[in-house]
Image: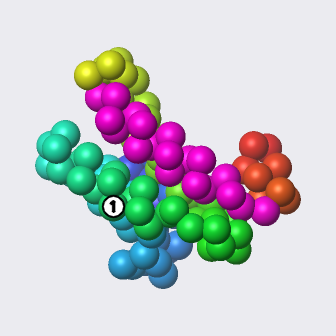
C-alpha cells in the first residue's frame, strides 16, 4: 500500500476494479489541481452518489468512499468558511452514502 493509501484509507486494488465509477470521482477530487477544479470534481461526485440503490452505497462504503470524503474534509478543516462549498459537497456525498443498508452503516462506525 502506498503512503497516500495509508493517509486517506483506500485500497488501490479496490479502486482499480472501480475505474470510471463513482469512487473514482471522489479520488479525482483528492487529486485536483486547485480549489475550483476540486469543486468541479466534488459536484460530479455529488451527482454520481445521488441515487437510492442501497447495494451500490454498501459497495462504495466498503471500498472506502467515506474515508476519502473524510480526508477531503480534513484538508478543508482550517478553512471551513473559505471552503464552504467543498464542505457542503462533502457532506452531501456523506448523506448520500449513508442511504446504505443498516448493517453497512453500523459496520462503518465500528
Who is closer to the viewer here, 84 or 26?
84
Percent across and percent down for residue 22 are 45, 69
Q: Is residue 108 above or below residue 48?
A: above
Q: Is residue 88 visible?
A: yes
Which element type, helix, strand or loop, lies under badge 1?
helix
Residue bounds of the magenta highlight: 83-101
Which residue shows up at 34% across the image and 28% down it? 84
Q: Which residue is mark 1?
A: 44
Residue 23 position by quadrant? bottom left
Whether residue 71 appears in this view of the structure is no
Mark 1 nearby-residue class (10 Å; few <14, some 14–19, many ≥20):
some
Instruction: Report if residue 68 lies within the magenta region.
Output: no
Judge whether 45 appears above or below 94 on screen: below
In the rendering, at what x and y percent does residue 58 appear? 69, 66
Q: Position of residue 71 (x, y in %)?
A: 44, 40
The quarter holding residue 96 reads bottom right
The quadrant in which the C terminus is found is top right
Q: Is residue 60 above or below residue 20?
A: above
Predominant SS along the magenta part: helix
Q: Residue at x 19, y 40 (%)?
A: 35
Query: What residue lies at 52% left-to-right and 72% top-to-bottom?
Result: 14
Answer left or right for 15 relative to 96.
left
At x 60%, y 56%, the residue is 97
Image color mode: rainbow
Q: Examine the rendered structure and indicate whether residue 40 appears above or below residue 53.
A: above
94 is within the stretch colored magenta: yes
- Is 105 displayed left or right of 103 in the figure? left
**Residue 53 location, quadrant:** bottom right
Amino acid at each position: 500500500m502506498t503512503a497516500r493509501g495509508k493517509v486517506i484509507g483506500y485500497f488501490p486494488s479496490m479502486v482499480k476494479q472501480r475505474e470510471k465509477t463513482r469512487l473514482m470521482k471522489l479520488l479525482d477530487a483528492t487529486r485536483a489541481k486547485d480549489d475550483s477544479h476540486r469543486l468541479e470534481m466534488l459536484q460530479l461526485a455529488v451527482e454520481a452518489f445521488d441515487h437510492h440503490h442501497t447495494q451500490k452505497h454498501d459497495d462504495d462504503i466498503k471500498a472506502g468512499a467515506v474515508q476519502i470524503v473524510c480526508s477531503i474534509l480534513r484538508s478543508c478543516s482550517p478553512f471551513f468558511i473559505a471552503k464552504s462549498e467543498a464542505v457542503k459537497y462533502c457532506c452531501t456525498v456523506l448523506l448520500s452514502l449513508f442511504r446504505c443498508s443498516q448493517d453497512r452503516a453500523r459496520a462503518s462506525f465500528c
